[in-house]
Amino acid sequence: MESGANNRFCLYELIRPRIETMRIVLVDSLIKHESDFSDVARLERDFHAARWLRQERFIASLAIANIENNVRRLIRTPEVRVVHLSELTDALVGEFEPDAIVLSGTLLDFDFYHSDLIEGFNHFIKGNRVPVLAICGGHQLVGQAYGATIVTLDKKLPRERRKDRIVEYQYRFVKITDPNDPIFVGFGDQADRRWQKYTQRRHLLRIWQNHGLQLDRIPDGFKQLARGYLAEVQMMVRRNEGQLIYGVQFHLEKSFQDWQYDKYWDHRNESRDGRLLFDNFLAEALRFRGREDQFVGNGHVAVA
């Protein structure tokens, strides 16, 4: 095997990390403590704090593991810190000095979250200057902080349709609307064998969807990057006022999920588009931070 390559998680191509080291904060965006539940949640007929928390913690463990797998496969020697949404503060950023922050997806509607959690996040994200990648529920969390409304796929408020929602739970194509954004560097390169023919022809991404909510519009200060069939705002970016925030409605992190024991979906191969997006985000975050010296083989770092 070539030095620095890892073929354990893809059957058809070697994964060659192009980044030497980065400090990454992974944010567990799900509910962690009973005190995190709002009064709205407590009024639900089936509310049971212990049972709901067990489910939240189980989903959180899967979500963080999938994201961390991407980080550890795409960066040679990452420094990772996992924190809960309630712990995402300016003090944390000042102490750890991360190069990027990645927000996990969520499970419950945000009106089931205690208002302190949402208000604390909104305050943080508006002042934050570290590059952010927000995934699924994290994407919605960012959107509401900048003025968008979270609605169901048939455009109702979450409280109006708690049950029997339309959901996307499958691989879908989404349309790239701004192929010139750096997140798509190399995607349309005919000479790049990593890329898939359908995207070369029509600027499409094939990605894993798992959600029943969406943003009703592009938030203030953001630009749309991709659109979908049921959820219009599939990708967005905020690149102004010293901020770099990418939001993706889909789950780009599924690429390295280990389905060795459950082969219901072979995410390792089917989600390669997501893996390339994740890799490009990490590279763009390094550039934003002025740390291009951490790219492997540029003369500034040792190549193993």
Image (cartoon, rainbow, N blue to C red):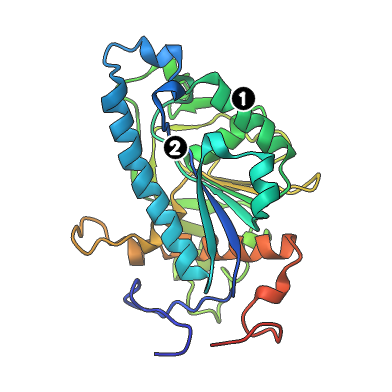
Category of crowding for the residue at label 1, using alpha-carbon neighbours closer than 10 angstroms: few (below 14), some (14–19), many (at least 20):
few
Question: As displayed, is residue 15 above or below residue 203?
Answer: below
The residue sitting at 44% across, 12% down in the picture is 39
Q: Position of 240 compared to 115: left or right?
A: right
Q: Position of 38 compared to 116: left or right?
A: left
Q: Residue 209 in the image: state x and y as whole percent.
A: 39, 46
In the depicted view, which residue is nearer to us: 200 or 30? 30
In the depicted view, which residue is nearer to us: 159 or 53? 53
Is there any visible trace of residue 232 in the rendered image? no
Question: As displayed, is residue 6 above or below residue 70?
Answer: below
Give me the C-alpha separation between circle 1 and circle 2: 29 Å
Question: As displayed, is residue 255 above or below residue 95?
Answer: below
Q: Secondary structure at mark 2?
A: loop
Q: Which residue is mark 2?
A: 230
Task: Of the two numbered discs 1 and 2 on the same chain, state the one appearing first in sequence.
Answer: 1
Residue extending farthest bottom: 2
* Residue 119 image label: 1
Q: Secondary structure at mark 1?
A: helix
Residue extending farthest right: 241
Q: Residue 93 in the image: state x and y as whole percent.
A: 67, 47
Category of crowding for the residue at label 2, using alpha-carbon neighbours closer than 10 angstroms: few (below 14), some (14–19), many (at least 20):
some
Quadrant for residue 264, please give it. bottom left
Residue type at mark 2: give it. Leu
